Image: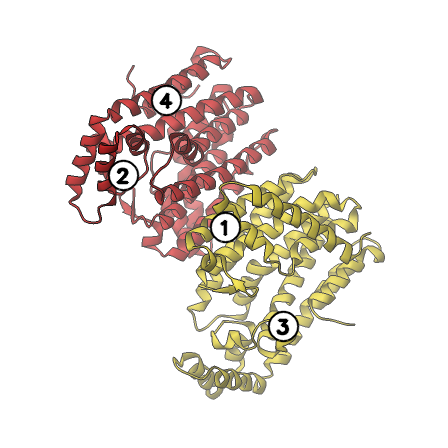
Chain colours: A yellow, B red
Amino acid sequence: MYSVAELNDLLTAELQRRSEDLKEMKPGNLYEPVDYSLEMGGKRLRPLLLLLSCNMFSDSVREALPAAVAIEMFHNFTLLHDDIMDKAEVRRNRPTVHKKFSENSAILSGDVMAFLSYSYLLESKSKDLEEILKLFTKTAIEVCEGQQLDMEFENRLLVAEDEYIEMIRLKTAVLLACALKAGALLGSAKLDVANQLYEFGINLGLAFQLQDDLLDSFGVQESFGKKIGGDIVANKKTYLLIKALETADSELRNELTCWLKKAEYNPTEKINAVLDIYNRLNIKELTQHKVDCYFDKCNTVIGQIMVSENQKQHLHEISRSMLNRVH
Amino acid sequence: MYSVAELNDLLTAELQRRSEDLKEMKPGNLYEPVDYSLEMGGKRLRPLLLLLSCNMFSDSVREALPAAVAIEMFHNFTLLHDDIMDKAEVRRNRPTVHKKFSENSAILSGDVMAFLSYSYLLESKSKDLEEILKLFTKTAIEVCEGQQLDMEFENRLLVAEDEYIEMIRLKTAVLLACALKAGALLGSAKLDVANQLYEFGINLGLAFQLQDDLLDSFGVQESFGKKIGGDIVANKKTYLLIKALETADSELRNELTCWLKKAEYNPTEKINAVLDIYNRLNIKELTQHKVDCYFDKCNTVIGQIMVSENQKQHLHEISRSMLNRVH
């Protein structure tokens, strides 16, 4: 088995090779934003999950590299289009594609990225290719559904907890799960085992997103990488806000709603006031508990997968590192 | 063999069924624009080409219906995104999706349409499914390249004839060709025969687009369906304008360029002035000759396909009707 570092090296080399191909492709104005987006980097979690899942069942991880790049390309496609819709100006400390190039570029180069991801996926040699393509397509449709729900929630004051969980399942978790299941199938795992990897991925994705919500309000800026309190300033319907609105008594709910409705305010003051309300409602502990529940489910699912403990190590390692667990 | 009318009826029923499915799908705000776009109608040429190509080799055209809907869904996806990029407000006499709903809706519902087209395609039962998916993906990438070139040409004064032909090959012809080749493969035609259908489709597509250019300036409004002269008013780089700039002497070229640069003008006056220049340069005859050349190539390719004359009738019928030939 490869180490996670070795898998990362394989992936980096493959992405580098694809980036060089993109620089040669015509028309250059179509492919330059694609390359820009791919070179932006990011954690490359999804392709890594695909490779290490494949590696649990097979040593031929190189054959899974095109599919790994496909997943990363698809993820970047969603970022391009989401950034237009959200009017985001910065991503990973660089201007977003629609800001650096143009909105039309971000639409059309995004489109071609969606099709390039199929093109890469179709390079895979696997008896399960049709199954993988169906999984990928179902996942892509669900990610669009998740983005739609996310946009709709922005315009609603009340979102129920289960609605929120369903939204992040669609927007975030299914793609992690798809990467893991596709990797398993490319490693010639049986379908029922691949489905266990999918279930692991869903729980990992939910825990990961909830933790992201948590860190945005309670994290340490240096390690989080983004400005703390951004979600609070933007009134983003996170798990924290949803639980606060749900558990607050009417007086505290009024206080919170008042901050949500304020048109003019000092951002630091708003962040501190909302954090204070969260603290009074134990929102941090409540969210942490939910993260722990999904993390526990991950471990339960790993326990059920019929492979050796040695093969499972990567799954433990990656879920601990994604969820910042040292134990 | 089915008649073209019968194939059209099969297609209409299938699209109706899919439309009913879409009305049930959640979130409704994501799928409503998809259904709106599909119900807009249009000529449905591409799915019809797929079905009649399939029917040349097989009686089981029903099995090609999901792929036919996939091609139509993909085509409509390109219209949604092109209309945003071109800032078009009306399509088929109804408001475009980004006007009726919102730009974000047109982006995201467009995206889900691209993936729905794969989802439909993946319903096909065919030993050549992988080949068809590769063809479809290559085609989708090329259509994006064609749209990119089309947008770039808008900002250039000089476009060479061969650049223009390459642009319309990518933007228009490859999808007709893909429909015909996919149909043939779904009808279990051999790959070399399917490739002949592809070549027929390329020539048909080029002739069709050049004729569209021609009709926009020299057509009769009632039968064309759009306002005559729209391309002239918009300075669209059509085959007519490209040939006029190429063949005009310096005096006439100056006259034409002068109209292209004018910021304020009476539209009817501009149309008449440019048409007059076209007439002095025999642009109508020159373009008609080019259409005839591609139409002749279509017939040559049909002649080479090794199937009975009876099986070829549909190809003759559809190319004549698309190119308004009575002979």
Residue A216 rendering spot, x and y as whole percentages: 58, 74
Tags 1 and 2 touching, CB below 8 Å: no
Task: Name the residue at 22% across, 33% down.
Answer: B251
Residue at mark 1 shares a chain with residue at mark 2: no
- Amino acid identity at mark 1: Gly
Tags 3 and 2 touching, CB below 8 Å: no
B83 w.r.t. B240: above or below: below
- Amino acid identity at mark 3: Phe
Which quarter of the figure is the N terminus of chain B placed in? top left
Tell me the CA gap for discs 4 and 1. 34 Å
Q: Disc 1 or disc 2, which is closer to the eye?
A: 2
Which of the labelled discs sits on residue B319, or is there none?
A: 4
Q: Which residue is mark 1?
A: A110
Q: Which residue is mark 2?
A: B231
Tell me the CA gap for discs 3 and 4. 61 Å
Along the viewing direction, whichever of B149 and A161 lies nearer the viewer: B149
In this rendering, does residue B25 appear at all?
Answer: no
Left-right relation of B156 to A105: left
Tell me the CA gap for discs 2 and 4. 24 Å
Neighbours of disc 3 within 10 Å: few (<14), some (14-19), many (20+):
few
Sequence-earlier tag: 2 or 4: 2
Q: Disc 2 or disc 4, which is closer to the eye?
A: 2
Quadrant assignment, res B212: top left
Tell me the CA gap for discs 3 and 2. 53 Å
- Amino acid identity at mark 2: Asp
Q: Which residue is mark 3?
A: A224
Left-right relation of A154 to A131: left
